[in-house]
Amino acid sequence: MADDQVHVRSALQILLKQEPNLYVVGEASDADSLLAQARAVIPDMVLIDFELPGLKERNLISILHQEFPWMKIVALSSLLEKRALAVKSGVDAFASKIDPPEVLVALLQSFAVNQHHVNS
């Protein structure tokens, strides 16, 4: 998971720790550390803040798709207007930080059990 705000990462860690089939294997605060961890761990899915510092969103998504074509990319933002840009950038799904936690968990679980859930 990647978010530049430590309190968001901590909250997500607490939320996801309780869920079957969802395992946090790394945390990143910027695009460079996300890419380094993804290359080291090779996760099935990444949850990223769409305004993550470092690379432009489109560039980061493009690199992730090129290096890990099977990886599901879920973008997270507090700005609902970022949804269209996130989808256009190629993320597999988008969730709002203002949605109830159950919405994010259901979305991530749908990928974890291999359900097709594109661009929600």
Image: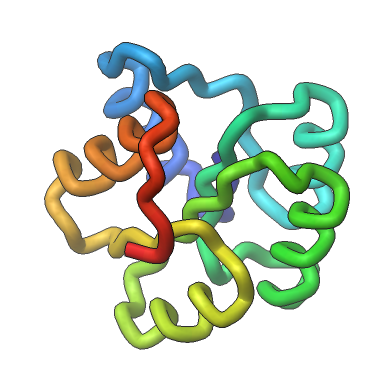
Residue 21 at what x, y percent from top left?
39, 15
* Position above or below: 75 against 72: below
Q: Is residue 55 left or right of residue 89?
A: right
* Position above or below: 96 against 44: below
Q: Quadrant of residue 79?
A: bottom left
Residue 24 at what x, y percent from top left?
52, 23
Task: Locate the C terminus and report the quarter of the image it occupies.
Answer: bottom left
How is the protein colored in the picture? rainbow
What residue is drawn where x is 27% and y is 45%? 104
Q: Quadrant of residue 39?
A: top right
Q: Is residue 59 left or right of residue 95?
A: right
* Position above or below: 32 against 25: below
Q: Relative to the observer, which residue lies in front, 116 or 13?
A: 116
Residue 38 at what x, y percent from top left?
77, 35
Q: Relative to the observer, which residue lies in front, 53 or 73?
A: 73
What residue is drawn where x is 30% and y is 44%? 107
What residue is drawn where x is 83% and y is 59%? 63
Q: Is residue 99 left or right of residue 85?
A: left
Q: How many marks?
A: 0
Task: Locate the N terminus and report the quarter of the image it occupies.
Answer: top right
Residue 118 at what x, y percent from top left?
42, 58
What residue is drawn where x is 78% and y is 43%? 68
Q: Is residue 21 left or right of residue 19?
A: right
